[in-house]
Image: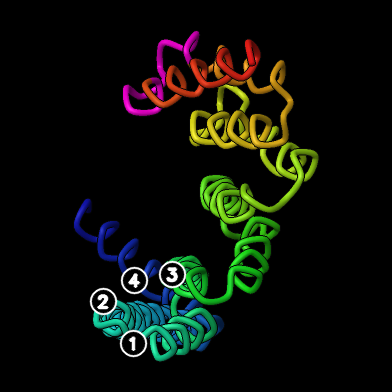
């Protein structure tokens, strides 16, 4: 008797499955097809991204080679093209290198390029700070202290990665402007910070001595 009931149950289950398939089979097939297409599309996208990254890497290396060979105009053009057409990571690096290549011959254009990076939130805080620092370094001999402090004072906070360099440039700018007390404030901040790198600490001590001599004179 048990076998008979078991066979009946099996028959009922088969009949139910048949009805379910007739009702929903097309949807199940469509869902499976979509899954296969989706996986294939994702794999294709990953391959395309890897290919683009490799192409951008090769283009960046070629631009660096041009720069190292002294072909600065060609290097600028190569970095500019990569800054537009490269993958996200290489676009940022290319913009920084383009500005660096412009600096020796056209500091005004280099500052403008660095300023554009510093204002671009997509670049990330570290890159933005680095660009702002490099622009200020190019301006320290010509721009008034008020402009340099406007550019760099936010970078001097304890949680900013380039705070030591920003403080050093500010101290130098204030000293060049004849603002002895402000220059001393920045050098004291550098010497009082235990995390200031040894090289920058030494330069701060030298500048502090110059400031002291200027004050006596």
Residue 200 painted magenta: yes
The one nearer the camera, 175 or 36, is 175
Mark yes or no: residue 60 visible: yes
Residue 90 on image: x %, y %: 41, 71
Q: Measured along the vertical axis of the image, is residue 153 above or below residue 85?
A: above
The residue at the point 52 percent across, 49 percent down is 130
Dividing the picture into quadrants, the one containing residue 170 is top right
Q: Earlier in the sequence, mark 4 or mark 2?
A: 4
Task: Tell me the SS state at disc 2.
Answer: helix
Magenta region: 191-201
Q: Earlier in the sequence, mark 2 or mark 3?
A: 2
Q: Crowdedness of circle 1 by 10 Å Cα count: few (<14), some, many (20+)?
A: some
Which mark, residue 11? 4
Task: Tell me the SS state at disc 1.
Answer: loop
Q: Measured along the vertical axis of the image, is residue 52 above or below residue 13?
A: below
Q: Earlier in the sequence, mark 4 or mark 1?
A: 4
> Is 159 displayed left or right of 173 in the figure?
left
Residue 8 on image: x %, y %: 33, 65
Q: Are marks 2 and 1 in contact (CB under 8 Å)?
A: no
Q: Crowdedness of circle 4 by 10 Å Cα count: few (<14), some, many (20+)?
A: few
Mark yes or no: residue 44 visible: no
Residue 156 on image: x %, y %: 61, 28
> Is 212 displayed left or right of 82 in the figure?
right
The residue at the point 62 percent across, 16 percent down is 184
Q: Are marks 3 and 4 in contact (CB under 8 Å)?
A: no
Q: Which residue is mark 1?
A: 71
What is the C-alpha distance between the residues marked 4 and 1? Answer: 82 Å
Q: Which residue is mark 2?
A: 68
Which mark, residue 155? none
Q: Which residue is mark 3?
A: 97
């Amino acid at each position: 008797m048990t076998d008979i009931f078991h066979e009946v149950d099996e028959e009922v289950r088969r009949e139910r499955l048949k009805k379910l398939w007739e009702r929903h089979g097309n949807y199940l097939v469509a869902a499976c097809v979509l899954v296969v297409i989706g996986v294939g599309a994702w794999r294709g996208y990953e391959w395309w991204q890897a290919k683009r990254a490799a192409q951008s890497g090769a283009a960046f290396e070629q631009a660096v080679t041009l720069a190292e060979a002294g072909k600065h105009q060609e290097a600028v053009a190569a970095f500019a093209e990569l800054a537009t057409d490269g993958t996200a990571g290489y676009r940022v690096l290319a913009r920084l290198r383009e500005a660096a290549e412009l600096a020796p011959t056209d500091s005004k254009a280099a500052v403008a390029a660095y300023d554009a990076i510093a204002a671009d939130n997509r670049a990330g805080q570290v890159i933005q700070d680095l660009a702002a620092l490099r622009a200020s370094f190019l301006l320290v001999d010509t721009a008034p202290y008020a402009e340099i402090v406007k550019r760099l004072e936010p970078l001097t906070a304890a949680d900013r990665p380039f705070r030591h360099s920003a403080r050093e440039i500010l101290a130098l700018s204030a000293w060049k402007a004849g603002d002895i007390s402000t220059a001393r404030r920045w050098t004291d901040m550098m010497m009082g910070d235990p995390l200031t790198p040894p090289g920058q600490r030494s330069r701060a001590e030298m500048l502090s001595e110059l400031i002291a001599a200027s004050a006596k004179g």
